Image (spheres, rainbow, N blue to C red):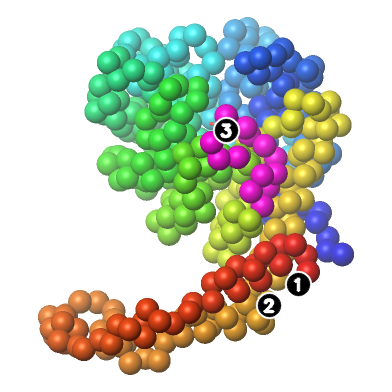
Amino acid sequence: MSDYTPKPEHKFTFGLWTVGNIGRDPFGTPVRETKSPADLVRLLGEVGAYGVNFHDNDLIPIDATPAERDSILREFKAALAETGLVVPMATTNLFSDPAFKDGAFTANDPKVRAYALQKTMHAIDLGVELGAKIYVFWGGREGTETDAAKDPITAIKRTREAMNFLCEYVRDQKYDLKFALEAKPNEPRGDIYNATTGNMLAFITTLDHPEMVGVNPEVAHEHMAGLNFTHHVAQALEAGKLFHIDLNDQAFGRYDQDFRFGAVNLKSAFFLVKLLEDNGYAGNRHFDAHAYRTEDYEGVKDFARGCIRTYLILKEKAARFNADPEIQALLAEINADDGSLTPFTGGYTPEKANALKNYTFDRHPLGARGLKYERLDQLTVEVLLGVR
Ligand code: GCO
Ligand code: MN
Ligand code: MN
């Protein structure tokens, strides 16, 4: 049997809001008592996590007095020292307070927009103080229920202005901090701007300091939009923009579920882990999910251990796939190249273009060849089912 013990180099992290989720939903009251940030750090230490992330108000309540703030921070830092956990990422809560009911950076009220910037600068200071190197922006309320309310082009411009302002703030403070933008198509707003990771990647190129800004894709968010998450992560990776990742699971077409990693779509979770591992992704593997509402805190630990364990098992399956002689022989056959058309590949030259235009193709054998993807996929499934 393999060893599925998490190690610091795996960089498995959880948010305070994930294991700290008390099971409130639109239909019911909490089912678990609230635990302090320090106790949640201890719980994460027990399950073998490497790091803990937080929104400003997960750690310091929005109405805390300076004395309360100091005592919470003291306890939290003591719990970090005791468990050896680190804080790799931090973020701002720009969605819970009624002030943000119409969004934060895109709110129509300029006072709300200014307050959002102020709150974020304070939260950045707090994150950096605790060691964060990545700062996530999830625009939970940055959207609308009706396009009569906000001009979508104005919303893009306001988001850009806020990101540019905050990049300059980080540079001014000489912080070693990068931003990771997290897309979501809807929930809690009817529609959220920059709905997919692809939208975010395009938006980043329009910023004053695009080199400081990448993405934080989340499994559930692309699945809510009915999209292939692995393809979005691949685009971010290829662009050098995968600064962070939120792992969880989600049935297509359902409400925002935030299930344990691999709980629903094992096969897509496998291709995702394989993509990350094959390409040497070195960032945090952050689980942005929570335990079923049926659970007590023992169940929360089962949930957290399950996320980690499933990731490590899928990592082993990816290595098995890569080492399987039959799979590799099939892949070699599928990708075979007799070299006859190599003269036409690579960069453009007018000579190549002219020669290619005049080349005579026999397209019938191109279409007649069976590609053996059925066999390849079945072998993949058998690796996953543990019979290879
Ligand atoms: C959600 C989001 C959040 C963000 C978090 C960090 O669907 O609620 O995924 O959990 O990831 O706010 O910015
Ligand atoms: Mn989410
Ligand atoms: Mn998330």
Residue at 51% in and 49% down: 229
**Residue 336 coordinates in the image, percent (x, y):** 46, 85
Numbered circle sitting on residue 388: 1
Front-most of 205 and 274?
274
Amino acid under label 2? Asp
Q: Is residue 180 visible?
A: no
| Span shown in magenta | 251-266
Residue at disc 3, secondary structure: loop
Front-most of 350 and 268?
268
Q: Categorize mark 1 by other alpha carbons within 10 Å: few (<14), some (14-19), many (20+).
A: few
**Residue carrying label 2:** 324
| Mark nearer the N terminus (1 vs 2) | 2
**Residue carrying label 3:** 254
**Residue 27 coordinates in the image, percent (x, y):** 66, 14
The quarter of the image holding the N terminus is: bottom right
**Residue 190 coordinates in the image, percent (x, y):** 43, 22
Amino acid under label 1? Arg
The quarter of the image holding the C terminus is: bottom right
Residue at 49% in and 50% down: 228
| Mark nearer the N terminus (1 vs 3) | 3
**Residue 16 coordinates in the image, percent (x, y):** 68, 29
Which numbered disc, 1 or 3, marks the residue closer to the eye?
Answer: 3
Q: Is residue 316 visible?
A: yes
Q: Quadrant of residue 356?
A: bottom left
Q: CA distance from mark 1 to mark 3?
A: 33 Å
Ligand 2 lies under 8 Å from the Cβ of mark 3: no
Amino acid under label 3? Arg
